[in-house]
Amino acid sequence: MSLPKVLPPLSVAGPAMRYAPETSAERIDALLKTVDFSKPETVKNAYEAISKMSIGAFLWDLLFYGGDHASGVKAFANLALHKCAETAGADSSSIPGRRDMALQTLKGGITCYGQEALASNLDGTVVADNSFAKYFTLEDRRALAVDTLLTKANNSMEAQKYAEAEKTYGWAKDAYTLLKLPRMAADACHASAAASVKAGELLKGAHRYLLAHTVYVHQNLLLEAADCRLEAAVVLLSMRSQDPHDVAAHHAEGKKEALNAATDYARQGLHEQAKKARQIAEGGVDLASFSLAAFHATSSVVA
């Protein structure tokens, strides 16, 4: 997504719009080309020059709002230099300021337009090609755009765009992992699994449920982990194929995971859930009408 030459005002609360020369981005690019990370003085000079530029007029009011303008532009300079260092394969230790603080400074004030720009091409296979996101590493773009990713994925699910939701939840999982928020990463992985199933990608969905199970276990969230295991089992047991060998293999795996889930529930003292999980393993439950909420609601302990 490329920024148009003329951008309409955003319907976002914030300061009055200011317009800078269209050469602002070119000046930033020129400054970054002067950086030699083996010479710390060139890094400092570029940082200070970008921090004092009219970049705020070109990008800040279009893509950010709120907060202190001077601090925000310094944060931008810090992250742009980190992207420059990553591209050059150079040591970034001479960059002024702290990267984590720069991310925190910018994250709180990204406009919807800025979030959309950051959220493009977050699967890592395509380099950011717009004149805003190109200044951030893939890791920083994920960190800045993570909340937007989750909102976009939820909206896609509501619109029944399940394949799109599955992909976006996956990006959110990666972003939360980078941010060291494993619970949020696990929840996003769980949601991605559900979207995959809705999109008809049953095997992918089952495997994603099992991946979420593993992440929940690492967080000692044992009920959520057992639920993911059971959901994977239901999907596997529901699979049909023209190849009877595939069906038999999927059903065998599903039965195994249902029995594993039963064991997990029993260890938590959830004996009614354990009993029902065993019934699922033995084919005693209508899988077409299976609902995890109903599974727990009809038991003595509600999840």
Image (cartoon, rainbow, N blue to C red):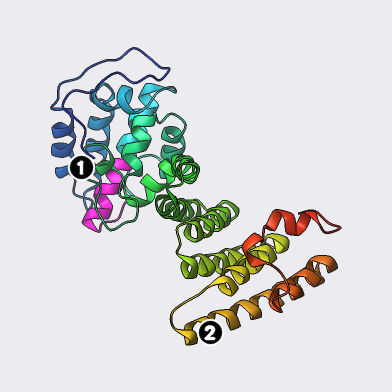
Tag of residue 42? 1
Picture coordinates of residue 207 (x, y %)? 52, 70
Residue 59 visible (yes or no): yes
As drawn, is 294 to the left or to the right of 119? right
Residue depicted at 64% across the width and 66% down the height = 287
Instruction: Place residue 296 in its image quadrant.
Output: bottom right
Which quarter of the figure has residue 120? top left
Helix, strand, or loop for circle 2?
helix
Residue lying farthest top? Answer: 16
Mark identifier at residue 249? 2
| Amino acid type, label 2 | Ala
- The secondary structure type at the circle numbered 1 is helix
Nearer the viewer's eye, disc 2 or disc 1? 2
Front residue of this view, candidates 64 and 36: 64
Which residue is more in the foreground, 136 or 289?
A: 289
Q: Quadrant of the C terminus?
A: bottom right
Point out residue 98 in the picture as x, y percentages from the top left corner. 42, 42
Q: Is residue 287 left or right of residue 38?
A: right
The three-letter code of the residue at mark 1 reads: Thr
Residue depicted at 57% across the width and 63% down the height? 212
Range of the magenta residues? 79-92
Query: Is the residue 207 above or below the residue 119 in the image?
Result: below
Magenta highlight on residue 80: yes
> Closest to the observer: 273 or 66?
273
Which x, y percent locates residue 230?
Answer: 66, 68
Picture residue at 84% right of the left edge, 66% below the top: 272
Determine which of the numbered discs, if any, sits on residue 62 in the image.
none
